[in-house]
Amino acid sequence: MCGIVGYVGDEECANLLVEGLRKLEYRGYDSAGLAVLGEKGLSVVRAKGKLSNLEARLAEAVPRGKTGIGHTRWATHGKPSDENAHPHSYGGVAVVHNGIIENHLELKESLGKAGHKFSSETDTEIFAHLIHDEMQKGLDLPQSVRGALRNVKGTYALAVVSDEHPGMLVVSKNASPLVVGLGEGCNFVASDVPAILAHTRDVIYMEEGDFAVITRKGVEFTDLAGAKLARPSRRIDWTPTMAEKNGHKHFMHKEIHEQARALTDTIRGRASIEEGDVFLDGCHLDTKLVQKLTKIQIVACGTSWHASLTGKLMIETLARIPVEVDLASEFRYREPLIDKNTLCVAVSQSGETADTLGSFREARSRGARGLAICNVVGSAIAREADDVLYTHAGPEIGVASTKAFTTQLAAFFLLAVRLGRLRGTLTPEQGRRHLEAIFEVPMLVERVMKYEDLIRQAAYKFSHARDLLFLGRGPQYPVALEGALKLKEISYIHAEGYAAGEMKHGPIALIDEDMPVMVLAPRDSAEEAGVNYEKILGNIQEVRARGGRVIAIHSEGDTKVPQLAEAAIPLPQTNPLLMPIISVIPTQLFSYHVADHRGTDVDQPRNLAKSVTVE
Ligand code: AGP
């Protein structure tokens, strides 16, 4: 949501800022703009819509200057328009902001009484006015921004320039992400690392309440009161090419195909087959701690919530600890029963999702130990956790999560084996068998990719559907939910995921030839067809009896399911708890090809933001 990028150095920065904003497009936006400080003072250029609209405006006259800030806006207060686009400026001060100012109406009223006129409907514009007023008192820019922030209640990542301070960026963070990049003879600020990855890999993640003054020579961190802070930099191992499309038409397609690599990176170095055990750097779980746990509480949103439903199954099966999974947006307001014997697991690709972060804080404030499963190193959730289990998916740019989901499942599986070994519910031999299975998964994932043509044909055949139902049982139920979410996000086809056994309790009424049904029907394991398989065969028959059209995802070698389906996609078989990592892939590719065929904006679907940093 909203992207910020800022630069101060020796280069003309307008194009550099636009390039940075392009790398933040995945966050979702509906207008964009930049402010550049040069010899002629402050120039602000803004445009509603895509970055190409901003570029068209810039082509008329590129603002010259070596200090600047840029922004992609995802509308909250005020519709998408040129006027509401950031930067907002007043009296030589320009501001970009990600977050929500809760007391903006109050502030607007009092500024209005003092004679201020506003040119937008946004909450952000208030900052420019407040900072300008402070500067009128003879304060410098850092003091003025501090003064303005003292009046504001809400969340923000903020970057400010003033024509009285060429060569200076003032930034501050409260609840919305901001990262400072350290260059040579130049420095940067951005909402996320990909925006600056082409220029530096040395970064400092800002903490809550941090305030920084950035010049080309260096960065000075203080708190809001002005007390100096030491903030060490870290070198990130993402490379600029990891944030490129590498010949794929869309990031989503590239990320689907990266899953074997991402899974290998997530598993590698964390498990020993000989010992039948897992070693999780950054997770300080030991027998004493784990034995006293009475429950595990997982909080997450969207795709991460679907991964958590499978995580529950893995942990309960392998470690025999009760696990609850909550949508983070519900958990934080429901007076949850949490105490010091609870382990709260927050699951988030970005590590910045506002509801997940809020719930994690809520659980920890009630005494729970906090473990984060995150992809972004140094993100807010990771920083606040007692234990961190990073997924090594690499940057995920497509708004629709793919490799984040499968690597989260791998992380959960490793965690479940570790907990099982610590609690004694898994013997070394059992641990060994599970680990052998997960080591094989990346290779099986590669094998599924070979069916892409078949999946594409099925996608084209059903791409005109208005509604689609996804059914799964047991470990395949969360996959059904995830398949439906993926399809609706990027193709705008209405889709529902259902536990197949629930079909008779309602959704069966919808079934006819206009409501295709994708059924996740692998065998339960290599050894036996299993109860889930037998039952779902019955569900397929029920769909067919009502004229429904079936797209089936089935085990390689199975002859029963394909006979009942109009399109059938085979899958290699693995341990049932790991099967969701394999079976989700055809659903990702199916959604991708449906959306691509329909010509939607696959990587940046309408109305969606990659990380939802506001409630
Ligand atoms: C997934 O495709 C979504 N775009 C979305 O549901 C996402 O999973 C959710 O917003 C949670 O994000 P997080 O993992 O970064 O916390």
Image (spheres, rainbow, N blue to C red):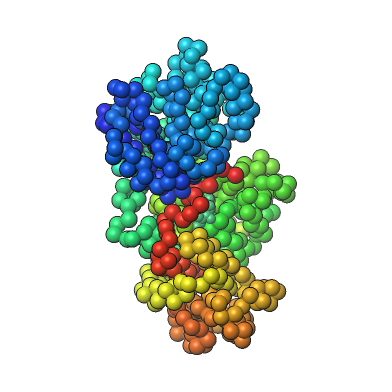
Rendered location of residue 142, percent (x, y): 46, 20
| Number of numbered tags placed on the structure image | 0
Q: Is residue 385 visible?
A: no
Q: Residue at x 50, y 12 (%)?
A: 137
Q: Is residue 613 above or below residue 492?
A: above
Q: Quadrant of residue 615?
A: top right
Rendered location of residue 438, percent (x, y): 46, 66
Nearer to me, 6 or 468: 468
Q: Residue at x 53, y 47 (%)?
A: 612
Q: Residue furthest top?
A: 138
Nearer to me, 287 or 138: 138
Q: Residue at x 40, y 73 (%)?
A: 456
Rendered location of residue 149, percent (x, y): 55, 25
Q: Is residue 322 visible?
A: yes
Rendered location of residue 405, percent (x, y): 49, 59
Nearer to me, 234 or 515: 515
Q: Is residue 116 above or below residue 528?
A: above
Q: Is residue 109 above or below residue 472?
A: above
Nearer to me, 517 or 180: 517
Q: Is residue 486 above or below residue 377?
A: below
